[in-house]
Amino acid sequence: MPAENKAYSKTFNSKSDKQNKNRAKQQKKSIASLPLFERINVFLTGYLDKIFWITFVLTLLSGLLLFDIRISLSGDDSAYIIRAYDFIHHFTYPGFQGPLYPILLSPFIGIFGVKVVPLKLISLILMLGFNWLIYKSFKDRIPALLITSMLLLMAINSFFLYYASQTYSEALFIFLQALTFLVFFKYFLHNEDHTTALQIRNYIFLTLCILGLILTRTIGITAFIAIAGYFLLKKQWKNLLGFTVSFAVLLTLFEFIRYLV
């Protein structure tokens, strides 16, 4: 390289270094001028992924330390196990309460038998899945301080983690709730596809989530009302029609197959 080019490159590099330093100083000044909570949000935003994995491990450890291998005295948890046993061995549809959770337990009973610990571990896995889905859903939608506080509270709250070692349907229900948030935010909130095939796929994904919520707990029907209300308020008539029709079709198909079987 000629001497003139070397001198030019050194000069250019020194100028770019100075510009970068000036930009960094300006950014620090602008951040320093922000209110306290906004400064905390800016700081936490750069570490959100690490914070999530720390709280994820903390949730796992807390769930294991609080893990209860006993069946409770309420009776609902043992009833789910009995209905799962009847479904896998006698093909009796678990129509009382939410049928989806006993159906989910049934293959594990078929493999392991009526072993309480493996069945309770399913709830712990669903709880961890809920943490991951809720983080993915709200990561870029709520302040970093809020999502960090939420993750920490979920990791150490014994009342919340109680359901991570019980054969209740709560763990499955909140897992499906978080999955519904993720699907709705990704495919319908500020995101409209113009390809008919993609739109139909998105409606099916969302409808399957809602159907799963309803089959887990009857209160899940409120999710359908909330999403339909959102489309109505936003005057998204196409989404409202597609979502309603897909829900009606899949629900009818499910009931028809159940009737035949």
Image (cartoon, rainbow, N blue to C red):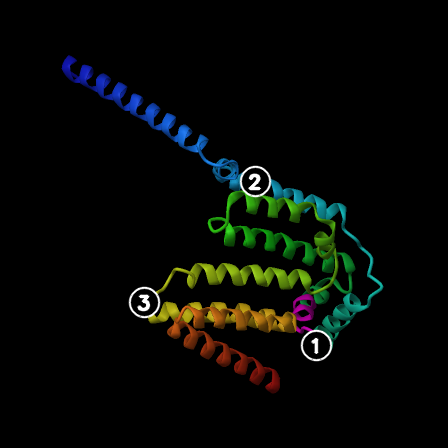
Q: Tag 3's secondary structure?
A: loop
Residue at image coords 52%, 43%: 144
Residue annotated with mark 2: 51
How far apart, in angstroms, are the residues tagged by discs 2 and 1? 40 Å
Q: Are marks 2 and 1 in contact (CB under 8 Å)?
A: no
Q: Indicate whether 238 appears above or below 114.
A: below
Q: Tag 2's secondary structure?
A: helix
For marks 3 and 1, the one nearer the N-term is: 1
Residue 250 lies within the magenta run: no
Residue 135 seen anywhere in this rendered image of the structure: yes
Query: Residue pushed farthest bottom?
Result: 260
Residue at image coords 71%, 67%: 110
Q: Indicate whether 50 appears above or below 112.
A: above
Q: Indicate whether 133 appears above or below 204.
A: above
Name the front one of labels 3 and 1: 3
How far apart, in angstroms, are the residues tagged by discs 3 and 1? 40 Å
| Res 109 → quadrant | bottom right
How far apart, in angstroms, are the residues tagged by discs 2 and 3? 37 Å
For marks 2 and 3, the one nearer the N-term is: 2
Q: Position of residue 81 (x, y in %)?
A: 76, 68
Query: What is the span of residues highlighted in magenta in the rendered image?
Result: 92-106
Residue annotated with mark 3: 194
Q: Are marks 3 and 1 in contact (CB under 8 Å)?
A: no
Q: Position of residue 29 (x, y in %)?
A: 41, 28
Which amino acid is tagged 2?
A: Ile
Report crowding for label 2: few under 14, some 14 to 19, many 20 or more residues within 10 A (C-alpha). Answer: some
Which amino acid is tagged 3?
A: His
Q: Position of residue 106 (x, y in %)?
A: 69, 69
Residue annotated with mark 1: 94
